């Protein structure tokens, strides 16, 4: 199994009706700029471990490094709900920073869904962000008002399926089954990393079966449409320098089959006032698993 280089400690923070789980690495220097890591959809805070291990000793020692499990993920409580709302992630992040780093600007990194969250947050609370890194947080395809009735109907249908148990996540016989699932999804993920991740991505229940630490309600579609114009206004309000990191594999092309492209995403990024872009070779969407050393080096340079 993968050997951790930097052990994390668990913090428990009451936030907006949830008991939030936060991982913290190292003993930070007082007054140093905190580095906050936000994971993606159906992921957990422990997913950042390989990148944190790849940081230099000097970088890791000079600042607090934390990663939270979003509500309904990992060890953070799942609220009593049958669907999740994107603005809650921004509100949770805001409340977390108020508790842990009141009045202090931070460096903020988000992957995938977490990348979308941090971009929106940085446009809403620009004074809270010193530097921002968006790792494969592409946003969503543009929508049209005519799609609203169908989207609302799909949401209602999925809520019904949720009540009937149709969205239940598949259980696994053991941790090895979870690791195999992770490697099937990401062919670059090595067995030692998959075995370690499986212990944090899932947990054994009283029946002995292993289940993913992600509320199935996260799979329910949102009833509202994604409005590109609103996202661009958020981007324009970002005052921090932004680094947008992509993998060499085109995840958007795989997901959306031409409905939303990297070219469209790059066009949206033109709204960001101060922007750098980087591409990490030989990596897919989970590039903090595929190339943690390369990503860590990029972040260290950008955040210096």
Image: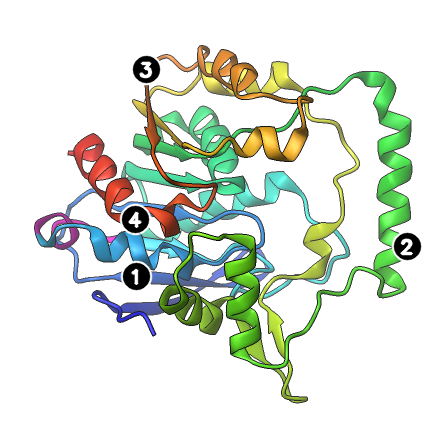
Q: Are marks 1 and 4 in contact (CB under 8 Å)?
A: no
Distance in Å between CA atoms under marks 3 and 4:
25 Å
**Residue at 48% across, 70% down:** 198
Distance in Å between CA atoms under marks 1 and 2:
39 Å
Residue 189, horizontal then vertical, whole percent? 42, 56
Q: Which mark is residue 24?
A: 1
Quadrant in which the C terminus appears: top left
Choose between 190 and 23: the one closer to the eye: 190
Q: Are marks 1 and 2 in contact (CB under 8 Å)?
A: no
- Considering the numbered disc 3 on the image, is that residue within a helix, a strand or a loop? loop
- Considering the numbered disc 4 on the image, is that residue within a helix, a strand or a loop? helix
Give the extent of the magenta segment: 58-65
- Counting the numbered discs, the total is 4
Q: Nearer the viewer, mark 1 or mark 4?
A: 4
Q: Residues within 10 Å of mark 1 (few under 14, many from 20)?
A: many
Q: Earlier in the sequence, mark 2 or mark 3?
A: 2
Residue 293 shown left or right of residue 279 in the figure = left
């Amino acid at each position: 199994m993968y050997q951790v280089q930097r052990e994390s400690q668990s913090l428990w923070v009451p936030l907006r009706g949830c008991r939030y789980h936060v991982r913290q690495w190292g003993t930070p220097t007082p007054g140093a700029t905190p580095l906050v890591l936000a994971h993606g959809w159906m992921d957990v805070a422990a997913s950042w471990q390989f990148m944190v291990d790849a940081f230099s000793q000097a970088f890791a020692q000079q600042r607090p490094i934390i990663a939270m499990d979003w509500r309904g993920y990992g060890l953070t409580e799942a609220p009593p709900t049958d669907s999740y709302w994107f603005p809650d992630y921004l509100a949770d992040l805001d409340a977390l920073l108020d508790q842990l780093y009141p009045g202090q600007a931070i460096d903020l990194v988000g992957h995938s869904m977490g990348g979308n969250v941090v971009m929106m947050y940085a446009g809403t609370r620009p004074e809270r962000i010193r530097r921002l890194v968006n790792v494969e947080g592409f946003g969503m395809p543009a929508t049209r008002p005519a799609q609203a009735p169908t989207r609302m109907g799909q949401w209602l249908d999925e809520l019904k399926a949720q009540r009937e148990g149709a969205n239940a996540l598949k259980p696994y016989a053991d941790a090895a089954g979870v690791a195999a699932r992770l490697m099937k999804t990401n062919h670059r993920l090595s067995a030692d990393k998959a075995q370690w991740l499986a212990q944090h991505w899932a947990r054994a229940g009283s029946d002995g079966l292993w289940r993913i630490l992600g509320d199935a309600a996260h799979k329910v579609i949102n009833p509202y449409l994604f409005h590109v114009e609103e996202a661009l206004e958020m981007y324009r309000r970002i005052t921090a320098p932004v680094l947008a990191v992509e993998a060499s594999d085109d995840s958007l092309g795989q997901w959306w089959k031409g409905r939303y492209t990297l070219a469209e995403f790059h066009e949206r990024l033109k709204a960001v006032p101060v922007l750098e872009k980087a591409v990490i070779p030989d990596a897919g969407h989970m590039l903090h698993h595929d190339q943690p050393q390369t990503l860590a080096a990029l972040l260290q340079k950008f955040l210096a």
